[in-house]
Amino acid sequence: MKPKLIELTERQERLLSGPPETAGMKSGHVVLAVGEESGRHSTGEREEMIIVRSGAGVVEIDGQKPLAVSRQIICYIPPGTWHNVKNNGRERLDYVYVVTPAGKAS
């Protein structure tokens, strides 16, 4: 594994793909048009962080009130959590997600 710089573009893309590129972290860049959504999925054995670059939307988490996200908001999603990111704003929603295997808290 080597340090690297990643330049974000205007399109959706995978940023880090896990081993052997990283020790387990994966990341991607997502762009959702108005009304689009990521699709309901689970974090599984990973924890996830969503970093909004621009736009606004909601993170729908099973059994909870939707969390509003917008620029300069980071959303943490614990392991084993079903969720969906939805653009309910007036412009495209641009965010980066980072997932990593969940370990024991120290």
Image (cartoon, grey):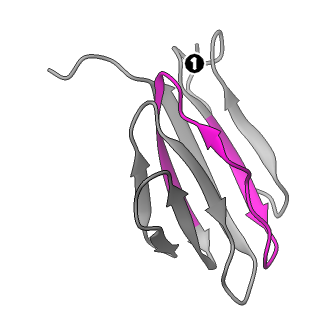
Q: Looking at the picture, how far across and down is residue 24, in whole percent?
A: 53, 17
How many dots with numbers? 1
* Residue 40 belongs to magenta span: yes
Query: With respect to residue 7, does 54 lie above or below?
Result: below
Residue occupying the far front of the picture:
63
Most distant residue in the bottom direction: 90
Q: Nearer the viewer, residue 79 or 27?
A: 79
Instruction: Find out whether residue 79 is within the magenta segment.
Output: no
Q: Quadrant of residue 25?
A: top right
Residue 32, compared with residue 47, is above or below; it is below
The N terminus appears in which quarter of the rendering?
Answer: top right
Q: Residues within 10 Å of mark 1 (few under 14, many from 20)?
A: some
Give the extent of the magenta segment. Answer: 27-52
Residue 5 appearing in the image? no
Mark 1 highlights which residue? 22
- Image spot of residue 80 (x, y percent): 46, 31
* Residue 91 shows up from this direction: yes
Q: Amino acid at mark 1?
A: Thr
Is 11 placed left or right of 88 in the picture?
A: right
Whether residue 31 sits left or right of residue 28 in the image: it is right
Query: In which quadrant will I find the C terminus?
Result: top left
Q: Give residue 7's position: percent from left, percent from top.
A: 71, 50
